[in-house]
Every structure is written in structure tokens, then in C-alpha cells.
Amino acid sequence: MPQTWQALYALAEQQHLSVAVERLFTGDAINHTENRAALHMLLRAQACEGVQIDGQAIYPQVQVQIERMAVLVHRIRAGQWRGFTGLAITDVVNMGVGGSDLGPQLVVNALQPSNPKIRAHYLSSMDGARTASLLDKLNPHTTLFVFASKTFTTIDTLANAQTALEWLMAFGASRALALKQHFIGVSASVPKMTAWGIVPEHQLYFWDWVGGRYSLWSTIGLTIAIALGMDDFKRLLKGANAMDVHFRTAPWQENLPVRLALSTIWNRNFLGIHGKAILPYDARLELLPSYLTQLIMESNGKSIDDAGRAVSYSTCPIVWGEVGPNAQHAFYQLLHQGTEAVACDFIAPIHRPDIEDEKDGATRAALNYQHQLALANLLAQSSVLMLGDAALDVPPTDAHKHYAGNQPSTTLLLEQLDTHSLGALIALYEHQTFVEAVIWHINPFDQWGVELGKQIALKTLTALQTGQSDGFDGATQALMLTLSGKPV
């Protein structure tokens, strides 16, 4: 195995990984199909690094937006932000999709205190059912909406924001008061926020060099700061920055993102493994598989290389997962005895201070037992994946009970789950994804593959509204007729 690692390090050097890392951190237009830098690391930098874009220093601009966000967060958490009838805000709804939804929701779900000052909710669905269900539970007099969209043109988010605005007006708010007292905009487009009606003092900005799936570190993380407080938000940034520094400076042999990425390359390209399962053994990380599914597959789901040629090798694995203890009773059967090999990432905190702080001794003992049980299952599953039934003193003779083993897995242990470690964990996977892209010679920062569906959806919406389905393929026309109630 040491020889394999040496060969993988040599592959990284052959693909000029060191050069790519420096280009990433120094603000080169590494996203070459959109002629943009990818400087999300600067959002969590702890000091000015002198990076400029178009002759302008970036770090001071980032700090201005963080301070603007801190002012709004203080008002909300102090009960000074009032709705249109003068009542203090109690609930904040983040309306976004993709990275504008998954990132903040992951962090708040993992770290939110049991009795938050302000309750945070997340709304991304475009079908209306989720919107109606959530609004039924909220008080229009005390609810604030965060309209989070990089372009401020995402049709899903626009539809939800318009519904929220009409809901407030139905309960007596004027349009002007509803927009002023109940909406904050977060976007890379100030003109579009203004055109929609967000007042300037309630606008937060971020930049086009911040990819959506990397945006939780920016003002898109507003609901994180509202739910946890600005101090915890800054600790999250500091944890991610610690991983940035490690990634940029550590030799490959000690570099966590590089080693994690090279293990993916080995499994995907040399062993031909198509799938990767994310398996956290802590229910607080239940959204991590969904978050990493987007981060990794939207970044590296590419078949065209940097030179515009079709690749002749496999790129991104299919990423999926579930909280480990639940997954054991769902799809581990395939992991252990199926015909498809899957690489697995097991993730868990070693310590649970929240359990140790439990005042009732009996409850503390019971919860500690459950934590130890989860860790025992994690270790057992990774061992069985590796060794199969050879781990038993007497392997079974019945073929139906045979575990072949020889399945790859990686175990990531956190000292504890807190804002610092979660920031580092997310940054770890960001950099792992970048390293994989460098090795595969693809661009991880664009996502042209999702655009065509959006364009056709707008065309299809017009056809559904007008009943004119000419120009569509036969199958789509038949489905449109079915939706309209007409005979096919």
C-alpha cells in the first residue's frame, strides 16, 4: 500500500496540483468557462491576504458585508426588529435553493441550540405544498423572510418569495411595509434586489466569484448567524480557515484533503468503483450526505476536460448516504453482499460535551451508552467491510451468510461536533473535490449541466399555461395533454 500512495502522490505532481492550489488561493480565473476566480476561502480568511480582482482588494469588501450582516443579526436577536404591527420577529425563513439552502440548513440543523432565540426555517421546494404547510405554522406578524439567491432570478425562489409577500398582504400588511419589515435580500445582484422591492438597508451582497455551493461562508450564511449568533458564525469561518491553511501548506503525505481525494481517484479510476456513501454516525449530521451530494456531483459531474474534449476516463462517483445507524437497516445489505462495490466515508465525533453536561446522572449515562453504541457500530461496520467474515473466529460455511469483505472505507473522527470542527469538515470536502477535479483535468466551479433544464422548464411553463404544446417531443406532448385533462 505505501507504493500505491507514492504512485498517487506522483500522479498529483504530474497533474501540477501544487500550481493549481496556488492559482486557487491567489485569485486566478480558475473557473475558466466563466472567466472567474473561486475565492470562497477569502470569505473565511482571518487576515488580509492582498488578493485583488480587477485592481480592487477583496478582503476589505468581505469585511464590510460581514459587519452589515452583524448589524442585522443583532437587531433580530435582540428583539429590535419588528414586523408590520410592531411585534418582535420570532421566526426567520430562508428562501433559497441548492447552496443557498443546503449549506445554511446543514449548519443550523447540526449546531442549533435546543432553545434558540429565533427559530430558523428553510424553504426550497417550488411545488407550493411545502410553502403552504410552513406558512400555516407561522405568524405573519412575527416572521421574517431571507430571500437568498445569487442571481435573484431563480424561478423557484422567486415563486416562494412572491407567495410569502402575498401571504403577508393577506393578513393586512401593505406591500411597502411587508417588503421593508419582513424581507432581507442576499444576492450578487444589487439592481435585481432593488427592482424586486428589497430596501437598500436590508440588502446583503456577495460576489460572482462565490459559487452557490460554496456560499454558506458569505452573507448567505445569515440564518446561521441569526440562529447561532455572530460569534459562532465567526468560529465556523475560523474552523474552515484552519483547513484552508492546512490544505495550502501541508505536504501531500499529511494533507487530509489531498489524501481523501487520492483515495477517491484510486477507488474510482483504478478499482472501478462507481459509488460513494457518506455515513455520519451522529444524527445531528443527517443533512451532510445531501449537502455533499450537491457539492461533489454538481462540481465534478463533468465529461468534458479543461481543453473542451470528451474525457476518456471516469470522473465523479455517484454520491449518496444516510445517517449510519439508519442506513444499517436500509442499504448496508448491498454494501456487504451486493454485486456493486461502494466506497464509504464514516464520520463521527469522539466526544459529546452536550451529553457530559446533562445534569441528570441516569439520563447522562443512558445517552453516553447510546453514543458508545453508535461508535461501536461504526467501527464494526468499517471492519466488516474490510475483512468480511474473516473477522469472525469461525467464518460461516453457508454461502448465503458469507461476507466477502475487501470493500474500501475511510473513517473521519472529530474531537467533537462544534462550529470550528464542522467548518473544518465542510472545507475538507470542498478541497477534496477541487483536488479530484485537478487530477481529472475538469472545471469543478461551473455547472452548465443544470442550465438547459431550467431553460426548457420556462418554455414548458408557457406551454402549460397556454395549452400550446407544439414544438415538443411526442412523449412530452402526451404528458401535457394528460395534465390538461384532454384525451391523449
Image (tube, grey):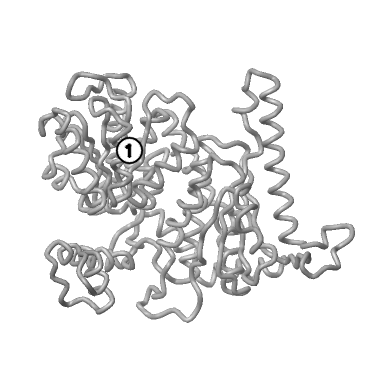
Q: Give the camera-side residue of 379 and 446.
A: 379
Q: Is residue 195 above or below residue 437?
A: above
Residue 480 or residue 32, whichever sits in front:
480
Count of all numbered marks drawn on residues in the image: 1
What's the amino acid at mark 1? Leu
Secondary element at tag 1: helix
Task: State the image quarter where residue 204 is shown.
Answer: top left
Q: Residue at x 69, y 66 (%)?
A: 337
Give the residue at x 26% y 25%: 142
* Residue 248 in view (yes/no): no
Percent coordinates x, y for residue 229 in the rendering: 40, 28
Position of residue 304 in the picture relative to residue 7 (left or right):
left
Where residue 407 sits: x, y (%)?
Answer: 69, 65
Residue 402 rendering spot, x and y as whole percentages: 78, 66
Check disc 1: other Cα within 10 Å, few if <14, some if 14-19, many if 20+.
some
Q: Residue furthest front?
A: 487
Q: Quadrant of residue 457?
A: bottom left
Work out which quarter of the rendered image holds the N terminus and state it.
bottom right
Judging by the rendered image, the residue that carries numbered circle 1 is 134
75 left or right, relative to 253:
left
In terms of image quadrants, where is residue 345? bottom right
Residue 182 at least partly seen: yes
In the rendered image, residue 162, in percent from the top left (x then y), is placed at 18, 44
Split into 4 quadrants, where in the image is the C terminus? bottom left
